C-alpha cells in the first residue's frame, strides 16, 4: 500500500487557518484523495489538559506538555493514518511551537531539542498575513487566548514564523508560504493541494 502524505498547516492567529483547512479538506476529497483532518492540541488526555490549562501553565512547562501531546499525536493518530494510505492534514504542528513557545519566553534551542525526534511533515504550509490585518481580525472576533491581549504579539508572531520557515527549510522540510490576504480560502486550498508532493510509488516484490 502507498503511504499517505503528511501536511501541517501553521500561521499567525487571524491568518485564516480554520477556513483554509476546511477548504483544503474539501479540495483534496474532491480530487478523490482519502484525507484525514486533525489538530493540536489534540483531543487526547494530554491535549485536553494543555487546552484546559493554557491560560496559567506557561514557558518551559507548557512547551514540554505541547511536545508530549505531539509525540503521542504522531504515534497514535498521524502515523497509523499515513501507513493506511491516508493524507493527513494537521491544524498546527512544529512551526507553531517554534513561534508560540518563543512568544512565551522559551529559548529556541530548548524547543528544537524537545522536538528533535518528532515525525516531520512532507509539506509544511505557513499561512502569512500582514500584522496589521492580523490585529484587525483578532480585534473583530475578540481575544481567544492570553497572547491576543498583547498588542505587540502580531508583529512578533509574524517575525517568528519567518524564522521558523528558515529553520524548517534548513533541515530539508519542504515549506510553502501562502499569503492569505490576497486569496480566498478556496484559492489558498488549491495552491496547497497542487503543492503536496506525490506519494512515493510502492515497490513491487519480485
Image: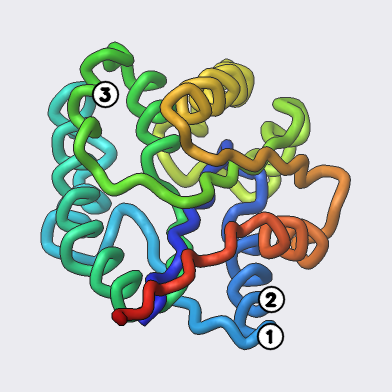
| Residue 187 image-quadrant placement | bottom right
> Badge 3 is on which residue?
111
Horizontal arrangement in the rendering, residue 160 relative to residue 6 (left or right): right
Q: Which dot marks residue 30? A: 1
Horizontal arrangement in the rendering, residue 187 relative to residue 148 (left or right): right
The disc, 3 or 2, on the residue closer to the chain's N-terminal end is 2
Q: Residue at x 67, y 64 (%)?
A: 193
Cα distance between the residues tagged 1 and 3: 37 Å
Crowdedness near tag 3: few (<14), some (14–19) or many (≥20) residues, C-alpha within 10 Å: many
Between 181 and 169, the one nearer to me in the picture: 169
Horizontal arrangement in the rendering, residue 41 relative to residue 13 (left or right): left
Crowdedness near tag 2: few (<14), some (14–19) or many (≥20) residues, C-alpha within 10 Å: some
- Judge depth for marks 1 and 3 and give the one in front: 1
Between 52 and 118, the one nearer to me in the picture: 118
> Badge 2 is on which residue?
27
Would residue 30 be seen by someone viewing this image from the given angle? yes
Would residue 157 be seen by someone viewing this image from the given angle? no
Percent coordinates x, y for residue 163 in the rendering: 53, 18
Do tag 1 and tag 2 residues touch (Cβ < 8 Å)?
Answer: yes
Amino acid at each position: 500500500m502507498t503511504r499517505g502524505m503528511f501536511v501541517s498547516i501553521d500561521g499567525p492567529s487571524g491568518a485564516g487557518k480554520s477556513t483554509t483547512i476546511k477548504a483544503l479538506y474539501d479540495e483534496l476529497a474532491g480530487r478523490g484523495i482519502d484525507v484525514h483532518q486533525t489538530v493540536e492540541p489534540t483531543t487526547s488526555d494530554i491535549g485536553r489538559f494543555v487546552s484546559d490549562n493554557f491560560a496559567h501553565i506557561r514557558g518551559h512547562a507548557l512547551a514540554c506538555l505541547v511536545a508530549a501531546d505531539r509525540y503521542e499525536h504522531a504515534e497514535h493518530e498521524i502515523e497509523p493514518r499515513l501507513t493506511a494510505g491516508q493524507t493527513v492534514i494537521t491544524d498546527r504542528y512544529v512551526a507553531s511551537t517554534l513561534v508560540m513557545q518563543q512568544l512565551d519566553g522559551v529559548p529556541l534551542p530548548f524547543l528544537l531539542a524537545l522536538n528533535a525526534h518528532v515525525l516531520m511533515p512532507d509539506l509544511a504550509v505557513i499561512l502569512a498575513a500582514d500584522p496589521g490585518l492580523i490585529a484587525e481580525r483578532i480585534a473583530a472576533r475578540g481575544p481567544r487566548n492570553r497572547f491576543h491581549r498583547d498588542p505587540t504579539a502580531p508583529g512578533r508572531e509574524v517575525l517568528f514564523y519567518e524564522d521558523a520557515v528558515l529553520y524548517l527549510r534548513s533541515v530539508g522540510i519542504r515549506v510553502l508560504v501562502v499569503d492569505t490576504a490576497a486569496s480566498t480560502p478556496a484559492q489558498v486550498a488549491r495552491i496547497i493541494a497542487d503543492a503536496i508532493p506525490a506519494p512515493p510509488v510502492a515497490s513491487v516484490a519480485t
